[in-house]
Amino acid sequence: MKKIEEYVVNELASSKKSLWQLLENSQFPLKDLVQALGEMRKREIIRTDGTGFVLTPRGRKKVPRDSSLYRSSICDHCWGKRIVPQGKFQEVLAEFQKIARGRPAPSLEFFQGYMREEDVVARAALMHRYGDVLRRKIVLIGDDDLLSVVLSLTGMPSRVCVLDVDERLGNFLKEVNRDYGLDIEFRIYNVAEPLPEDLIGSFDVFSSEPLETMSGLKAFVGRGVGCLRDNGCGYFGLTVLEASYKKWLAVEKLLLRMNCVITDIIKDFSRYPMNYGTVNYESFAANLGFPVEKSSGVNWYKSTLFRFEALGRPRGVSFARKKLKVAAVDMEEDLTHPWANAKPK
């Protein structure tokens, strides 16, 4: 908790911050940060009036001398992504934003939520920069974000296939295909089930935003690798907020065992709204034990983007054929899902 306390003190040294602003810049698990804030209140290092946190006189004594003189910021052009969509990607973004307005509303049943439209287009732009879009066969396992639509609007992939458990998404993509002359394939698929044989080893590229339980991560990533041809590549997102570094290590080891190498890890590449109307993943704030002002639209929930490549033939075929048990919620690390115990330990 020492690192988290140092982070909070440094953040509050210059000004008052809301819970959501502290989360926006945090690189710590959500439950750990919330627990640290509670302990710091008890020790009278910080205080809150419900609109934000400030340092107490005792907390001010913990501010490192002259630390505020050393400043830095994330690039306000790419926002740390290392990629800026240009040219036709700007036209794709405008069209995609119109299409996305008709998407199915997120459902708690599937723990759904989608990233900002500009972040979806940025992922497509990064994929293209690496040569992973033009004339490539691409499979998406889960597609709340509608990356399939963005990729198809470019006209560059030779095949785009979506595997998703939500039939509503399939119906929506069917309408998009009809209205925009696209050819997105859709199959109802639950990652707990073995991959269909005709999909194993059939794609150049895989992309997903997996569940962040240990079993969910292994299922989504493992199924994705199982879909790849020799020298294929994959993209997936992983948070720090609800996926501890223990989970990161497990996923990295899984990729190594499957003969894959991680080529890129881009922190905070994607941001997610957390209140979708039908589902509010910010409701946990009501049970924290201290007053919290409603979020004013801060996109504090961020996902780090991983890219990996198979070195020759991936070793995911046997795993792809196994039936798995997949948990949707991690009761130890999840805080945003209403099923989880929202009271910090």
Image (tube, rainbow, N blue to C red):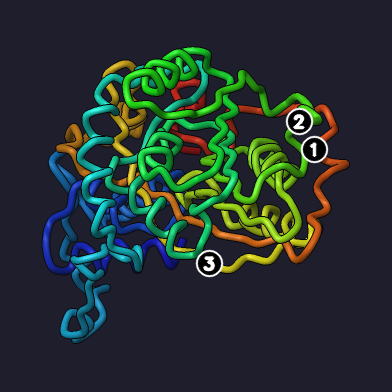
The three-letter amino acid code for the residue at tag 3 is Asp
Q: Earlier in the sequence, mark 2 or mark 3?
A: 2
In the foreground, 38 or 259: 259
Q: Is residue 38 visible?
A: no
Residue drawn at x 30%, y 27% is 286
Q: Which residue is mark 2?
A: 195
The image shows residue 299 at horizontal and vertical percentages of 26, 44
Q: Which residue is mark 3?
A: 264
Check contact, mark 2 vs mark 1: CB within 8 A: yes
> Which numbered tag is attached to residue 227?
none
Q: Secondary structure at mark 2?
A: loop
Alpha carbon separation for disc pair 2 and 1:
6 Å
The three-letter amino acid code for the residue at tag 2 is Leu
Q: Nearer the viewer, mark 2 or mark 3?
A: 2
Residue drawn at x 71%, y 61% is 231
In the foreground, 74 or 145: 145
Q: Is residue 48 visible?
A: yes
The image shows residue 115 at horizontal and vertical percentages of 35, 39
Q: Secondary structure at mark 3?
A: strand
Local crowd at mark 3 within 10 Å, few (<14), some, or many (≥20)? few
Q: Earlier in the sequence, mark 1 or mark 3?
A: 3
